[in-house]
Structures are given as C-alpha cells and as structure tokens.
Image (cartoon, coloured by chain):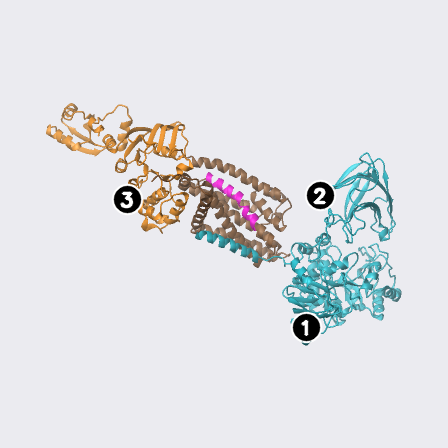
Amino acid sequence: MRFSFIVIAGIALVGIFLSVLPTPEVSPVPTDNDARLASWPASERYQIVNVTVFDGQQWHEHASLSIEDGRIAEPFERTNTSDIEQIDGQGAYIIPGLIDAHTHSWGNALKQSLEYGVTTTLDMFTDLRFFTPKSAERNALSPRQEADLFSSGVLVTSAGGHGTEYGIEIPTIASADDADAFVAARLAEGSDYIKIVYDASASDAGHKGRFTSIDYATLNAVVKSAHAHNVLAVVHVMDLLSAEHAAKAGADGLVHTFGGTRASDELIAQMTSQNMFVIPTLSILASIAGEGRGRALVSDSAFSGNISADVEYAIVHDIASSRISDDYFAIALGNTRRMHEAGIQIMAGTDAPNQGTAHGISLHDELALLVDSGLSPTDALKAATYLPYSRFAIGERGTLQPGARADFILLERDPREDIRHTQSIRAIVKSGFRVPSIFETEVETGETPESGLVSQFESDLLPQLGNQFVVSTDNIMQGDSTAAITHVEAGCGGSGALRVEGRIGRQFPYPWAGTFLMFGESVSSGYNLSNFKRIVFDVKGTPGQFRLMVMNPQTARPSEVSFNVTSECQSVSIALADIGGVDWRNVAGIGWVAGGSTPEFAFELDNIEFE
Amino acid sequence: MQTHQQPLVSLRQLSKQFGKETALDAIDLYIQPNEVVALLGENGAGKTTTISTLLGQLTPDKGEVTVLGYPAGHWAAKQQMGVMLQSAALPDNVTVIEQLRLFASYYPHSQPLAYVLKTALLTDLVKRKVQTLSGGQKQRLLFAMAIIGNPRLVILDEPTVGLDATARREFWSCIRALAANGTSVLLTTHYLEEADALSDRIVVLAKGRVVAEGVPEAIKAKLGGKRIRFRSNGSVEAIEQAIPGCAAQCRGDYIELHSLTPEAHLKTLFDAGIVLQDLTVVGISLEDAFLHLTQPTQEYAVPAKEMSA
Amino acid sequence: MSQFQPIPLSLSKRWQILMLETQTELLKTFRSPAFVIPSLAFPVMFYVFFGLLFNAIGGNPGNAAKYMMATYAVFGAIGPALFSFGADVATDKDKGILSLKLVSPMPVSSYFAARIATAMLFALLIILSLFALGAVFGDVVMTRSQWVLTLVVVLAGTLPFCAIGLFIGLSVSAKAAPAVVNVIYLPMAFLSGLWVPIHLFPNSMEMLANAFPAYHLAQLALLVQGNHAGSPWYLHAGALLAFTLVFLVLSVRQFKRVDNRG
C-alpha cells in the first residue's frame, strides 16, 4: 500500500514540523536538574570546565571557573587537577550573579530575587527593621538562600515628601543646615549610600503634586555631606529639571531616568563630565506607561509556567497611568539610549516590588529593555554586574575575577545572541553553593481538607477546618488598632456565632483589625484549597465595607477582597478565583477585617464554609 | 422458460405515481439466471423508473421488488450487481485505471483489472484521463465499472444512447462477451435493433405498462415491417382481396397498408394488375408501433403463424 | 459466475476503500490547480499582509502575529471544508457520480470520510504554512502543547463547516454552488473577525459575530493562546456542535431527496 506509506510519512513530517516550531525558551527539565544538583560537589574546592565565562567585563570562550572556599580562585594548575573535583559545564554560559540596582525590600524579597539569579540587591529605601538584620548576614560565605542586601536605609526627603506615604515612621530633613547631622545619622544606622528624593517643581507656585520636596540647597548640602563621609549620593528624580539640579549638585547617580521630556544635551554633557551613572528603572516606567511587559513575561517567556501566583499577580497589573503622554515610555527609552551613547554608565534596576514589577523576574526584563534602548547584550550584562561593582561599595560582587565571591549563574544559552537567554537558567550558585532556581523550587502543597465546612460556632470558636481563630490587627505594623473575639449564643444560623469587636487606629496608614483563621500552628504552613470554588459565610454587624484577607506562607502581603456588611444577617459568597494573587494550593489562613471606613466596628460571623 | 429456477429479479405488480402522472402501472418483470432481458420503450415509457425501483432509489407505491433474494437497495444485492446509469458522468481528471481501481475496492470479489479492461476494450486506454475519452470509450469505462465487481446481474440503462454506429457495435460486443460468461443482464434501450441483437427476451414498455413480452423474433414481428403507400386506380377492397388481411386504409388520395413482407406483397399487387403511382415504402417508427400496441383494437393484423414463431 | 456469496465489508476493507477514495479525491483536487492555488495562497497572502505587517507596526512583538495566525488558520481551514463539500458534492450530485456510487456497494461513510480527510489535509497544509510564516517572520512563540492544540482545534473545527458545505452541495446546483459558498464564506470570515481582530469592531458587530460558527472556532483557537474574548470554551464548542448537528439533520433530509430522485 503505497498510499499508506505516504500517509505515515506525512504524519511523521507534520510531527517533525511541529517539533521545530519555536517555543518559549525551554526551562531545564527538573529531573535533569536533580541529576546535576546531585553531581554538584560537596567540597568547597571545585572547577567547572567546558564553559564560556563572562567575568563582568569580558567573555572567555572554552574556559573554566575555579571555586575555592566560596570565592573564585586562580585557575588551578593543570598538574594537580586530579585532586580537585571537576564538573562538566556542558557548554553552559556563566555570568556573575545579577545585581538589581534599585529595589525596595521586605518580606520574601531576597529569597525571591535569588531564585531568579539576582544574587545582590541595592535597595533604595526600606524599613530598618528589615535591613539591619539582613545586612549583618550578607558577608557570610555560608550557604544562604537569599540575595545579599545593600541599602540606603531611610531615604532623604522632606516632611510630606515622597517616601513618607508608606506608613513607616521616618525622619525627614527640614533644611540644608541639617544635612550633616542627617547623613551621619543614616550612616550610623548602617546605610550603604545616601538616596535623596528631589522634585525641583515642588517649590513652584501652583505645584499640583502630592508631595513636598527638599529644596535645592538641601539637595546640594546632602550630596556634599555624603561625599564628605565618602559614600555615594544618588537621587530620585522624575523629570528633566530635577535631573539637571541633581547633576549640578554633584550627585553620583540618578536612580531613575525620566519619560515625558527629552534629556537636554546640557544634562547629558554635565553627567558625562562628572562621570555620573543612571539607573533608568525602565521596568517601572514601562508599568507606568502600561506596556504589558509583565503579562508578556507570564505568557511568553522562559519563566512561563513557573511563576508563582503572587508574582504573577504583581507583574500583570501595570500602573498604566492615564496622566502621561503616549510617548512617555518611548522618550524614557530614548533618554537611556542617548545617555548610553554619550558614555554615561547605565545600571540595571527595577524599582521592584512597585506595581507591575517583582523581585528577580523583573530584572531579566530590565535587561531586555536596556537592549531595546540600544545597549548591546554584553553592555546590558555589565549594567547588572560590573558597573554596580565598580561604583557601589558592595565588595567583590558583580565580577568573577579571582577573589570575587562565587556568585554566578549557569545559562543554557548564550545571552550575547539574545539577552532573554539570561532566563535560561540551569543553575544558580551563591558563595560557591548551588541554590535552587525558580525552575527547581517545588511548590509546596498544603494538606487538602476533607470537608469545606469551617465552623457553625455551635458551642465555641474552635474551627473544624484550620487550627484556631485569632485576633489580627495592624499592631504587627506598629499600628494601634484593636479587636477582640468572643463566642455569642445567637448567630445567624440560630445557634452560636463568632463576634468581632474593635476599633481602627490611626497610626498605620493602612489599618486593619479583625479575626484571622490560622490553618496551621503558624503561618508557615497551610492548606490546599484548590479544590474549592467559593467561600460562603453569614455576617451581620456595623454597616460598611469589610475585607476578606488571604495569606500564603512566606508572601509579604495578603491578598484582599471587599464585602459589604449590613445590620441584617446575610450570606456572603465570594469566588476564590476573584481573589487575585493567591496560590490556593497552599494557603496559610484567611481573615475577616475592618478598615479605615468603619472606625468603631462589630460584626458576627457564622456558617463559614468552602464550597 | 426455466421456471424451476428462482428468478434473479422479480418485480410484481409494481406501480408508481409521480403526482397525477402514472409512471408505472402494475408492471411484472422477472429476470432468470443467465438471461439477457431488454426493456424496450420510448423515452418516458417507464424504463428508468423501473430501474430506479429495482436499485432501491425509488420506493414503489405498490408491488414487490426482490433483487437477488434481497429487498431493493440491500447491500448484499448491491454487491452482486453492476450498474450503468443513464445519466452518470465521471470526474474528468481521473484516469481509467484509477477509476476502476476505486470501484474494484467496493466489491469483495472483484475481477482482475486486466480481464475487465479486455472485456470492455479499454486495455490501451488505462492511463488516459476521462476527459480525453470519446463518448463510446466513456460508456465502455462505465460498463467496465459495472462489471468489475464480478456481478451476477448487470443493469445497463440506455448504454448506447448518443453513440455512433461503430461505437455502438463495439459496445455490443462487450455486452455479448459478458452474456457469454453467464452473467444476467437487464438492458434498457429504445432501439429495437439493439434489443434484438443482444437479448434473449424483450419486454416492451409503453406509458408505464408492459405491452408486449417475448423472444426477439416475436417482438420484431409485432413491431417490425414497412408501410407501403401509393396512389392507385384500384380500390381498397381490390387490394384487400389481393392480399388477404392486409388492412389497407385510405388516406386522402393515398392508400396505405402495413406489411412484414413488402417485397412479396408488392409483387402480388403488380401481378394482380393494380397500378401503383407515387409509391413509397418506409419503415414504421417504433413510436407508431408502440402507439399501435397500446391501443386495445389492433389495426395491423399479425399473421398467426408468426406469433407462434 | 455466481459462486460468490455477499459478505459484509470488513474493517480493513473499509479502511482500504477509505484510503483509495481519499487518494482519488486528492488526485482529482490536485489536478485542478484553479482550486488548489487560491485556497492555499489566499489565507497565506492575507496573513502576510494583515498579520505580519500589522505585527511589524504594533508593539508587543509576536502577539498580533500570533493572534492573526490563529484567525487566518481558521479562515484557511474552513475554506476547503466548505468547498470540498459544497462545490464538489454538488458536482458529483449533478453529474450522477453520486448516484452511481450510491447504487454501488460503496459504504456511504467512506465517501464522506474521504471528503473530510481531503478537506482536513488542505486545512493542515494551510495551517502549517501559517505556522511556518508566523514562527519565522512573525516571532510567534508558543509552547509545544499550544502549537499542537491550535492545530488539533482548527482541524477538528472544520467539521461543522463540512456539514454546512454538505447541505449547500446537496441543495443547490453544481453551477450555483461555488457562488453560494463564496457568498457565505467571505462575509462570514470578515464578520467573525478572521481578517481583522474582533475587538476592533463596534460592539454590535461583536455581538453579531456570535451568530457565525467561524467566530466560535476562532475563539477556541485564540483560547489556546489566551487571546480570546472571554467566553468559556464550552460555550464555543457547544455552539459549533449545535451548528454541526443542525446542518447534519438538514443534510440528511436533503440527501434522502437526492438519493430517491428518479
């Protein structure tokens, strides 16, 4: 049957055809990784051969990389290769661990960064309670599964200026006279460099912005003071005039570029002559412009399919401001291009985790954006490795010269061909130790409860599903809201109910108070609720809007959805799919809380059930 | 008649109306094994309706149809039958061999292609596309498709319509070869000559009824003959006296008479001294003959001895 | 000559018939370039003009090309289905080929299965050409399962159009059939958003698109890549199934008439 052969051959051809169609860059197969992970040496002295190495400045073909005691060693002599362990790199491309030069860190930021190959982050304002302990750990060479944190600590801003709106009580600066004392205080707190927020237009009559700003004299004084203390002074600016002032004041770098206006030739000339650098943070500007970069990362990148629910939620929702011009982002790219062409050093930073960006993953996209704005892939890699190393006091990070910390990434594919190949992560090595990448982190799945019934509160507050109901308020964020929970006899179902009473305080800008159902002993473990479609409960109480909060273990922020309460008993039903950013496979707990709209509140919950 | 054998096809009291028009009126038709039956009739006589009923394309209003022991249209009947439809054409850009191979695949016991090609005189045309074939060659291809399944019964609906004399002769030889093999054939035609040349038995249809049935010689006797037409000094009576039972008729100036043996009758007339002017001798058309057969009173006498032939 | 008893067709025999029937259909089709070239070239050409050139203009590389690749695949795939059934069945019917086959012991299923196979083979060629263009010139990137699923969805989705074509083929004359098919095919393609993305249409036209099976198939194909308008897959699949059933029932009625004409 000749025709049958043609048919079979045809089917085979179609199969071959389909198999050569382009797919998102393939992440290494997990089993492969396990095998490679298993073969990673336990010793602290080994050599990776058969690799191409980018040391932060230059590429070395057919090279090897030697590691000893958590640092890059001089290549071992050929003669004594027998006593050191060798790993076949199988043609991988090794680049230094990436550095994100503009982040804001809390929660699981450092762990998440590292999973994407970002081994160092330069924070541009965080809470000291987070920064101080993390900065103490960063110089250890012991195995750690977090990126190293450097930070400006508290930023320099005026009372009512940008930076004061986050609910963390921070000191502000009033005048140029305070500059020395202010800088000294920051350095005493451990700040690695000084970050200044400056908006030249804030002093204009008729200024419409939300924030005040320090004046030029203060800016100038703070920069001088930082230089007197031998630390860098970097400036947050969002427009041309402010950038020109920052340059005039002698700042070391700008931590954003700006859209809206073309950079003036004078600014570029001045920045070039002063050897200023710029961290354009195109990722956040793209989010402001609503470029849909996050959505593209989710649907169409090497990371597709491996992105956790909270990261996905964070990056797919751009800020998409309506108050900017259509060419805002194009101008930002153009400014970056012209600065690069003028020889100004460009560094990669994301401003994660502001809306539309997330730690780690956004840096890969920032590299792609830098290439889009005219940098070569190698220049983009330098922007995330060697340049931060050469300008910031961050030790031997961002380079793979002998003596540097052994923080590096093995890539399957050559990033010189396509910068997006930085996403083809085979392995991440931190201080010589292999750490799990985003492709290897196993999703923890919680226990699956047998029944979705939480409680009808017949006789007490003990839930059938979960561990216990507890009071949850903004106290953990230094707020002063209060709440109390009691069991009452007559609830919506006739029998008992959970009563929550409380008061919303004013100290924390995003206050909450209410009750939280913990599924486990702590919030580090949870339940798999992915089989359920909705949560249903009866509620009555103070009329107003309340919130349902869902927590995943180890995520910084709970996901929330609002519901309305009236003085009559009513049944509330919320589809779980409507609560964005939750990984329902592992939920630590769920809370019912009041917010600022109901300062004095009370409500009764009954018949809580997952369906 | 081999009545002891089960007929291959039996149509009993078959009637079919199309609206007010009666297409078939209580038709009986039997085909015995190894028999070639010609269904003779004018266009519209009901031949194609009969065939359609037999193939199961049409459901009769009344009557029974059994084909090869099965109801009409049954798959088992189809497997033992080959059909050439009057209206069928073939796809243009398929070759003879491709078309035959395809049809051969439908039958469980198809004949060897070489044999079929030889029978249908297509051996030299295997690689030709249908669009390059002449009318006769196309008909022979359709014929080949009808016999490829090694059928017990072949139905040929007007197989030689539109063919010239040579093509028709070639086609006849194909049918003869088939009949010689013992296959039963039901053939429709409106050529008496063709029915006579090919069949063992002729069934004459007119206006949906069987008007005559018999061996070819008998039917020929009924439908054959010539019309003799002349002006004469002699009277009709004189002529009828000279040729007994000739049923001469006056048509204006002319006298007409129908004769199966015109030469002998003319000699008789000459011998009787009757003067003939403006003499014409023409064959009568089948149409006239059919009309004549359907009329209850027969105008043309058929000698009794010929009926028994 | 009558020593053979009738035997029901075995499965392998039926398969053999289907193969031969398909082979003959294909030979017939490929020997008429007037049909082959336009049906292959039009979707490909349109895709190059609209899909790839639009893509070159807009941002978000690959997405417009990916979107259009799916809609033009649908456009390209339903054409052969409508024509193979619409025009070819009408020709077979008018020429008496259909009658001849019906009085032969050919299983009716193999006749239709062969046509479906032919239509799908065409669809396959068109889809694969579009895939190649999209991948090479449009920067289209999808996961392996998305590629395969798009192919499978569009191929399977030609079935409702086979049913519609069949109804047309059985209902109108061979001369009228190509015109009737075109009158249905081209406006439906446009109004279903196969040429221009549906979201560029006014709302009322977007609503109207729901009336066309091509819209539902396009949405299914877009659903595979996550570019659909939002309705769940089972609504679209259900609509397609309904179209198939309705036209099959209509065709069966029409078929009985053809089979029983004198």
Chain drawn orange in the picture: B
Residue B199 visible somewhere in the drawing: yes
Provide the secondary structure element on which disc 1 rests. helix
Chain C pictured colour: brown
* Disc 3 crowd, CA 10 A, few/some/many (<14, 14-19, 20+): some
Q: Residue furthest front?
A: A83
Q: Do labels 1 and 3 share a chain?
A: no
Identity, as a three-letter code, of the amino acid under mark 2:
Lys
Left or right: A196 with respect to B277?
A: right
- Give the quarter of the image for residue A124: bottom right
Provide the chain ID for the residue under circle 1.
Answer: A
Colour of chain A in the image: cyan
User: Mark 3: which amino acid?
Assistant: Glu
Sequence-wise, the earlier of marks 2 and 1 is 1
Q: What is the C-alpha distance between the residues marked 2 and 1? A: 59 Å
Is residue A100 in view from this perspective? no
Residue bounds of the magenta highlight: C151-171
Q: In which quarter of the image is residue B303?
A: top left
Q: Looking at the image, which is closer to me, B178 or A370?
A: B178
* Disc 1: CA contacts within 10 A as few (<14), some (14-19) or many (>=20): few
Residue A82 is marked as 1
Asked if residue C155 lies in the magenta stretch, the reply is yes
Image quarter in which the C terminus of chain A is found: top right
Of badges 1 and 3, nearer the viewer stands 1
Q: Mark 2 points at which residue?
A: A533
**Relative to A478, does residue A101 appear above or below in the rendering?**
below
Task: Look at mark 3 in the image and give the residue it sits on.
Answer: B170
Distance Cα–Cα, label 3 vs label 2: 80 Å
The answer to whether marks 3 and 2 mark residues whose Cβ atoms lie closer than 8 Å is no
